[in-house]
Amino acid sequence: MNSRFLHHSGFSLIELTIVLVIVAILSSGLMFGLTTQSDTTNARESQRQLDAAKDALLGFAMTNGRLPCPADLATPPACPSPSDSTSLCLGLEGSFKADGTTCTSQYGVLPWLTLGLSETDPWGNHFTYFVSDQFSAKVPDGAQASFTLDSGVTSTAGLAKITNLSSQGSTNIAIDVAAVIVSHGKRSAGAYLSDGTKIPNAMGDELKNANNTQTFVASTPTPDFDDQLVWISQHILKSRLVAVGKLP
């Protein structure tokens, strides 16, 4: 009797299989939930970093009368101290052209070391940074700023524009923008690597944020787009410099 009772009280192979399937389904759902939560947390942190970077750029401009040049990871500037390793100076703003007036490049990496910011976004990628020559040129001797209230008005050359997704008509969100900062998201395509090259395979609207043109795309995330960006309006930039007396 006892052996018969023990035999019938155990799990059959079918019952064990069902239990294992249920456990696998529950585990899969838990992992999916944790991944989604992690992605949401990273996106929020990335937006916080972008907002902080925008504030830092405006603060730099209010102090120096111009926006900083992008950092050049492929050809970093000389370190202030000859004893410093070049790798320690990768995050400094880039240099000016040989004529000493404008930045060597309008495109590059956000100069995190100059601005006192984190080097990378939550996915370990550098922030792409575009700045117009009109608002990052070297400040002339005797001047308070490298630009005037007429800059970007009488001529809009070299200024950026922000559009929505091509599937939404690529209509303008903002025009005549002085600077743009991009986080390339979890997908990472188009982000700068530490040697100055870019992560390949940016496509569609994400390619517009990585192909060194003056058109950028901003949108809520979609399956094919997870870039995040902020930009600085020339009018906000000018108002900040007026407030500190660097523009009349």
Image (spheres, rainbow, N blue to C red):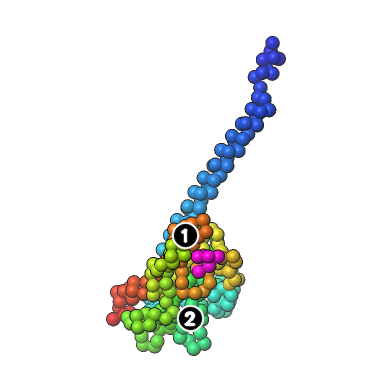
In depth, the one of 185 and 85 nearer the eye is 185
Q: Quadrant of residue 133?
A: bottom left
In depth, the one of 204 and 94 nearer the eye is 204
Screen quadrant of the C terminus: bottom left
Q: Quadrant of residue 51?
A: bottom left
Q: How many numbered callouts?
A: 2
Q: At 39% from the left edge and 67% from the top edge, which residue is drawn?
A: 173
Q: Residue 37, position in %: x, y?
A: 49, 49
Q: Residue 118, position in %: x, y?
A: 49, 64
Residue 235 versus residue 146 in the image, above or below: above
Q: Amino acid at mark 2?
A: Cys
Which tag, 1 or 2, sits closer to the chain's start? Answer: 1
Kindly tell me whether residue 181 is visible in this rendering. Answer: no
Let me know if residue 206 is in the magenta part. yes
Q: Residue 195, position in %: x, y?
A: 60, 71
Q: At 51% from the left edge and 79% from the top edge, which residue is drawn?
A: 105
Apparent side of residue 71 relative to residue 8 in the rendered image (left or right): left
Q: Amino acid at mark 1?
A: Ser
Screen quadrant of the N terminus: top right
Q: Residues within 10 Å of mark 1 (few under 14, many from 20)?
A: many
Q: Which residue is mark 1?
A: 46
The range drawn in magenta is 203-208
Q: Residue 231, position in %: x, y?
A: 41, 68
Let me know if residue 27 is in the magenta part. no
Apparent side of residue 187 relative to residue 143 in the rendered image (left or right): right
Q: Which residue is mark 2?
A: 103
Q: At 45% from the left edge and 86% from the top edge, which residue is drawn?
A: 101
Task: Tell me the tag on residue 140.
Answer: none
